[in-house]
Image (spheres, helix red, strand yellow):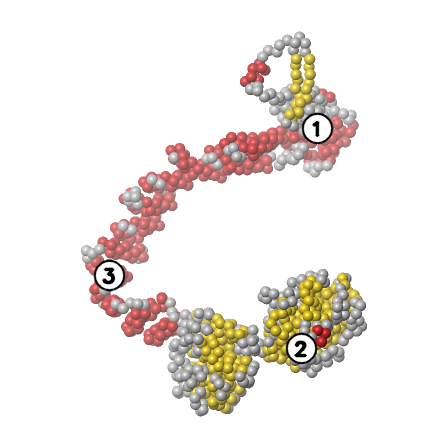
Amino acid sequence: MRAALTWRDKAEQCIYDLAFKPDGTQLIIAAGNRLLVYDTSDGTLIQPLKGHKDTVYCVAYAKDGKRFASGSADKSVIIWTSKLEGILKYTHNDSIQCVSYNPVTHQLASFSWVFQKSVSKHKSSSKITCCSWTNDGQYLALGMFNGIVSIRNKNGEEKVKIERPGGSLSPVWSICWNPSRDEHNDILAVADWGQRLSFFQLSGKQIGKDRVLNFDPCCVSYFSKGEYVLMGGSDKQVSLYTKDGVRLGTIGDQSSWVWTCKVKPDSNYVAIGCQDGTISFYQLIFSTVHGLYKDRYAYRDSMTDVIVQHLITEQKVRIKCRELVKKIAIYKNRLAIQLPEKILIYELYSDDSSDMHYRVKEKIAKKFECNLLVVCSDHIILCQEKRLQCLSFNGVKEREWLMESLIRYIKVIGGPSGREGLLVGLKNGQILKIFVDNLFAIVLLKQSTAVRCLDMSASRNKLAVVDENDTCLVYDIHTKELLFQEPNANSVAWNTQCEDMLCFSGGGYLNIKASNFPVHQQKLQGFVVGYNGSKIFCLHVFSMSAVEVPQSAPMYQYLERKMFKEAYQIACLGVTDTDWKELAMEALEGLEFETAKKERKKRGESNNELFLADVYAYQGKFHEAAKLYRKSGHESLALDMYTDLRMFDYAKDFLGSGDPKNTKMLITKQADWAKNINEPKAAVEMYISAGEHMKAIEISGDHGWVDMLIDIARKLDKAEREPLSKCAYYFKRLDNHGYAAETYMKIGDLKALVHLHVETQHWEEAFSLSEKHPEFKDDVYVPYAQWLAENDRFEEAQKAFHKAGRQSEAVKVLEQLTHNAVVESRFNDAAYYYWMLSMQCLDIAQENEQQKTEMLQKFHHFQHLAELYHVYHSIHRYTEEPFSFHLPETLFNISRFLLHSLTKETPLGISKVNTLFALAKQSKALGAYKLARHAYEKLQGLQIPARFQKSIELGSLTIRSKPFHDSEELVPLCYRCSTNNPLLNNLGNVCINCRQPFVFSASSYEVLHLVEFYLEEGITDEEAVALIDLEAPRLKKREDKWQEMASDGILSIQNTLWFS
């Protein structure tokens, strides 16, 4: 880890506090009695803010980025907007020490020497120096001058009290909650002037031991994800710690006390404010510390841990060092870790290649400064600029090499234990090989450009170098000859299992090169660090991954050059089964029998006679090959050979009078060939003779040969359902429905036959079948009804649905018919359809007991609508047509009946305007002037069509010249209670006195002289009819008494007669 200074500025006064805008674009600094606003990208001072009269001690930004607050020694708090405008100012009784926004509710907590929050005030036993909210905003921690940490809820009530050792001698000067969402518990970092750093849970329980600091801490803050802690104070520097309190290093040395330091949100940038007014902005750069050997990769995690990853099995093991890990090296079963004051050497528990358990072998308790670290079987190698030192595991220096230039790259290239070889690249372009037991370095070659990366081939004959110009150069080590070079490279690695294959990365691509062939490219982000077989190990940012790369491309490159042995070696690294077969075929064609034989052995084939037969076949000796195939028990291969070559006669001779199955197979293949060369009729005949009826039927059907299909269908046995069904399918497709029906009858597929009749719309045949087989009734009548509906024969469709037992579909058709009739103003038809709907509901109620209540309700509803549309039909004709078909009295009665029936809601299509207009005109004509005036007044409140406008306005004026009463002849009489009812009744078509419903004439809609009555219990319908038919006896003395009775909520009146 290193810190790079991005920008620095100097204020005139001490910097006591600073705060970042949540998006990281601005930095607010408390300097003297002003606030300074900086652009974090380049350190430009955006604007100084003046509002306080004395030193500003604290500043805090709200989590939503809309406002920030500042607190000053002038006892005031100012709230500023993100546009740098002050919007609110309030005061305390003393100077403000700290302010903090709740991260959830955005409440502001401000503290003077006495704890005050919002308008609520809470007294504290000591001065408050610092504060911090938990992530969820539920609790607030307060640090006090007497060494106590008080944790309180949002209401200011103290929940936990933490007393630090040292009491008032250890003032708590800075506290901060860990912002990590991954932690199971809220963790509070506490820094006091007893020079200790401690960590506590929300419950007050301490985590671990106190960390001794050796300086007075003035500020402590976490990184955005809580992985690291920053701390500064009297030691005039800012230090980086792990979240457990392990010191990792110094970020920046300052010339005075550090009073505040904060991390830019979601970044690695740190801002520092000092006593002398210095503002520093640093970028922290965390370098990758790692090591790789074959398929084991070790890397640093959380700065203090080492994780060893097996790249093949994906196993991982974590080694906790609890100190800053500076360097890592891994080789075979050894692992070396450099810590600030020592080097630890680990070894594997066993020699098992999959073992991931390490134990400490040696400790070298010395402090070393080095640029690179390498571990061997018995030594560690330290590299410091131009110097290489070889140390034993006891820390004893055994050998030292001094180079001419800076060492840029070093790698262990293997060798016997204690005598390993090192490959070293220098900045001056020199490349050396050093053996750890030899004091003299061997110069392999010297190039003009600096070395960035090195690797040596498996046989130690070739050397690959990446220089500072991003060029990959490959040399022959013995002749020093440059074999080839490739541009755009940042790292290179030889395949450990193939001498002539290497890969290099650069420019977002992975490049694989075999021998002198062109480079094969594919996209890949990162650096290549290893190449083993078909796996390439790639480092991207901080993550190592193993990429499986098929070796097909280089294998085919070798095959194109007829380099079969090299192609075989590449294939052994990992190619597909298809690639293996292609290799074998190419080798046979190239007469490279040894390679083809190896390929067969690789696939588990060891029969030499079979291999020799393949060789004869490729040489054109087909009869000899056939004999060998038969001898090795692979007659099918001989047949395949003959048929592939279209040598059907030779194939028949080869079979002789053999297995009929083979003969059938041969004929089938011959038919396939005939089909492929566009001889379909010959193919059909061959398929039929081979018993492959399906293929014969498909060819005949596709070519439309109906005669041939008929011949096949009639020759087939009825048990062969599948080919017969296929024949029927083609008959249907070719519009030969009679033959299709014949075929379905032959196999007894009645359901398919019914569907055929339905599809061809042969309804009579379909009805005949459904009568003989009732189970197909739905299959016939439902499509029939749908067909009728599609052809606008809706009433027939409704009946067909009804006949099929599909009551719901029948009802839907009727409902649609009714809706269409209403929309098209065919109100008489609508009335008829509603009547039919009511009858349907009655039928359903009789058949289905569960739906009886619902259907009866619908029955009454549809009957009511049928009646309304029936009467409205007359109104509609009166208003729309030039001549009237009804007497004025009839139209008058119909209009009244309709208006009385529309007391609750108006059905679709029925116009109140038309109804009132007809009523007004007929009332005026018949002398019901009062009712006519009322109708005209009602019309004034409705939207009147333009064609009625003049007539209604004229009628409204002229009706005022008429007397304000109705003709007594028109007043309806109740024939139950003899009450005269008004012409316009708010109750509807019932008596206003006795509530008896009126019974109307179906033609003139006059009130009939009828009263509905109910029989008393015990009187049957037959007895009632007999009583009605009796001649009424003469009365000697009669007393009429009317009795009014209420029963079950129904009011009825009985006329009781007494005879003496």
Residue at the image point whose x is 21% and y is 60% from the top = 654
Q: Position of residue 294 (x, y in %)?
A: 44, 76
User: In the rendered image, which quarter is residue 951 located in?
Assistant: top right
Q: Mark 3 points at which residue?
A: 635
Query: Looking at the rendered structure, which numbered label has been put on residue 985?
Result: 1
**Disc 2 residue type (three-letter):** Gln
Residue at the image point whose x is 36% and y is 39% from the top = 750
Query: Looking at the rendered structure, which numbered label has been put on residue 833?
Result: none
Instruction: Look at discs 2 and 1 and give the one toward the viewer.
Output: 2
Q: Is mark 2 on a helix, strand or loop?
A: loop
Q: Is mark 3 on a helix, strand or loop?
A: helix
Q: Could you tell whether 472 is left or right of 661 in the image?
A: right
Instruction: Look at discs 2 and 3 and give the one toward the viewer.
Output: 2
Question: How packed is label 1: few (under 14 Cα within 10 Å), some, or many (20 or more)?
Answer: some
Compared to 784, does 603 lie above or below?
below
Query: Looking at the rendered structure, which numbered label has been put on residue 195?
Result: 2
Q: Can residue 193 be seen in this view?
A: yes
- Tell me the CA gap for discs 2 and 3: 92 Å
Q: Position of residue 289 (x, y in %)?
A: 53, 77
Residue at the image point whose x is 35% and y is 41% from the top = 749
In what quadrant of the picture does the N terminus appear?
bottom right
Question: How packed is label 3: few (under 14 Cα within 10 Å), some, or many (20 or more)?
Answer: some
Mark 2 and mark 1 lie on one chain; the one further toward the N terminus is 2
